[in-house]
């Protein structure tokens, strides 16, 4: 693949986002709908795919005390700025929250599950005293595919556009070999976005270590290191910083992160374990940035086949990227990077996604620990054999098997998870 195309993939898939991307995507659709329907809001109707509902149901929204599907769509409609894309909720205040809550209390907000095979689908219909607008987002959290005003289509694009599909083909055509070669040769001046992901995600990680967010997973690990209960090694450093970032993000921190393939939690899990290990090993800044770029690209490569949302936890793919990057930090070779990915696939493939929430930080912690374990085994030339489970002797085939499991083998699981969540 041409080297500039790899950089284009990074620029497409690394996006600054404020708040968990599922409620933010709902808010973006609602804010866009309101932009096209002037006047006083009379009614808002949200329909979303099961995976969107699962991830937007309970997660915190930056700077707000309220949460939920109805709140996300109402907040986007009354105060969101659609021009900010995945930072649509940036700069909102208490008055904005109260205006959204008032809409809900007045019975003007309705939500439900969309009848669609798509795993990422959002449809917002907004009626005012002057107009009716409808906005659809599909396949990608900021990918608006339809805008209607008073029954007339004013925009039709996004994933229906052939150019977008070609970009997806380019992501699919990446290989671990090509990624490794690109990381070795790319000029550092081309990695400014990767550097930004380190800077922003480290800030929210540090915030989680000092603040009282969610389950305080990262902070608790750090405190137990200080007590001498846990050892002060690269595994606990990776777990603590990464989990702390997720603690803060999942529980309403107003700090932005750089997301990977549409997920802020994946962005955190791709970068912070690698950053923590790099700092612990005291490697050069250049080596750390190249390692994080490797982690990002491995994860993008896997997620291009895996899909944006699944019954399986996406942070597992981030753990695969981080494992390969940690091998790189420890001067491992390409074969050992592949072995680390294989070991991670063989370890965390069955981790289910039961929605975005504070508990996601525990999964980030687990996958960060597995990334370190997998890397250390690989550096000792220990790799799960192709006779075991669905692991193949070719890492690309193992990735394909993992993605088939997430896409084809878990649809019933996905439906059951959502059913269990909605029955509570």
Image (spheres, rainbow, N blue to C red):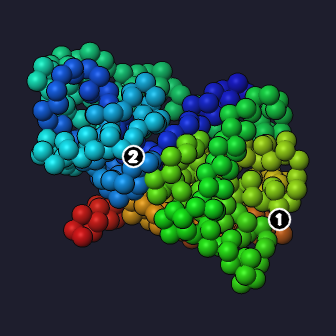
- Horizontal relation, residue 12 to residue 184: left or right: left
- Crowding near the residue tagged with mark 1, few <14, some 14–19, many ≥20 C-alpha atoms within 10 Å: many
Give the number of the mark in front: 1 or 2: 2
* Residue located beneath label 1 in the image: 379
Whether residue 111 is visible, yes or no, is: yes
Q: Residue at x 46, y 57 (%)?
A: 251
- Closest to the observer: 55 or 66? 66
Considering every residue shown, the one lying at the far bottom of the view is 229
Q: Who's the residue at 45% across and 47% down the image?
A: 62
Task: For the C terminus, give its image quadrant.
Answer: bottom left
Say which quarter of the image contains residue 46: top left
Element type where label 2 sits in the image: helix
Q: Residue at x 63, y 62 (%)?
A: 210
The answer to whether residue 408 is left or right of residue 260 is left
Percent across and percent down for residue 69 are: 28, 49
Q: Is residue 172 visible?
A: no
> Are the residues flagged by discs 1 and 2 in contact, CB closer than 8 Å?
no
- Label 1 SS: helix
Q: Is residue 295 left or right of residue 243?
A: right
- Mark 1 / mark 2, whichever is N-terminal: 2
Residue occupying image coordinates x 47% and y 56%? 250
Whole-percent x, y for residue 278 in the image: 81, 55
Find the residue positioned furthest to the front.
95
Vertical side of 353 occupied by 299: above or below: above
> Crowding near pointer 2: few (<14 within 10 Å), some, many (20+)?
many
Residue 22, disc: 2
């Amino acid at each position: 693949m041409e080297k500039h195309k790899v950089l284009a993939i990074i620029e497409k898939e690394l996006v600054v986002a404020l708040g968990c991307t599922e409620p933010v995507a709902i808010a973006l659709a609602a804010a866009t709908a309101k932009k096209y329907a002037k006047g006083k809001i009379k009614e808002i109707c949200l329909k979303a795919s099961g995976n969107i509902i699962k991830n937007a149901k309970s997660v915190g929204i930056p700077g707000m005390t309220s949460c939920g599907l109805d709140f996300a769509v109402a907040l986007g409609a009354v105060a969101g700025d659609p021009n900010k894309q995945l930072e649509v909720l940036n700069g909102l205040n208490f008055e904005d929250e109260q205006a959204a809550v008032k809409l809900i209390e007045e019975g003007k907000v309705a939500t439900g599950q969309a009848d669609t095979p798509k795993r990422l689908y959002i449809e917002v219909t907004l009626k005012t005293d002057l107009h009716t607008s409808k906005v659809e987002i599909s396949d990608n959290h900021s990918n608006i595919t339809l805008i209607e005003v008073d029954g007339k289509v004013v925009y039709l694009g996004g994933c229906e556009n052939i150019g977008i599909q070609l970009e997806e083909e380019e992501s699919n055509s990446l290989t671990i070999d090509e990624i490794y070669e690109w990381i070795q040769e790319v000029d550092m001046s081309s990695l400014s976005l990767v550097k930004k992901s380190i800077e922003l995600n480290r800030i929210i990680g540090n915030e989680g270590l000092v603040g009282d967010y969610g389950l305080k997973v990262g902070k608790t690990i750090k405190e137990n290191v200080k007590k001498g209960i846990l050892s002060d090694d690269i595994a606990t450093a990776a777990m603590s910083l990464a989990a702390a970032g997720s603690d803060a993000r999942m529980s309403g921190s107003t700090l932005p992160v750089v997301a990977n393939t549409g997920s802020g939690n994946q962005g955190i899990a791709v970068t912070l374990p690698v950053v923590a290990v790099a700092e612990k090993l005291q490697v050069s800044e250049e080596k750390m940035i190249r390692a994080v770029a490797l982690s990002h690209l491995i994860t993008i490569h896997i997620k291009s086949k895996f899909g944006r949302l699944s019954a399986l936890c996406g942070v597992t793919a981030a753990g695969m990227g981080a494992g390969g990057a940690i091998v790189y930090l420890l001067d491992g070779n390409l074969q050992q990077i592949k072995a680390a990915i294989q070991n991670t696939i063989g370890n965390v493939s069955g981790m289910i996604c039961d929605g975005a929430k504070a508990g996601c930080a525990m999964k980030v912690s687990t996958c960060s620990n597995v990334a370190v374990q997998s890397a250390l085994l690989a550096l000792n030339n220990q790799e799960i054999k192709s006779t075991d489970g669905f692991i193949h002797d070719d890492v690309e085939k193992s990735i394909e098997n993992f993605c088939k499991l997430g896409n084809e083998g878990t649809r019933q699981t996905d439906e059951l998870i959502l059913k269990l969540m909605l029955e509570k």
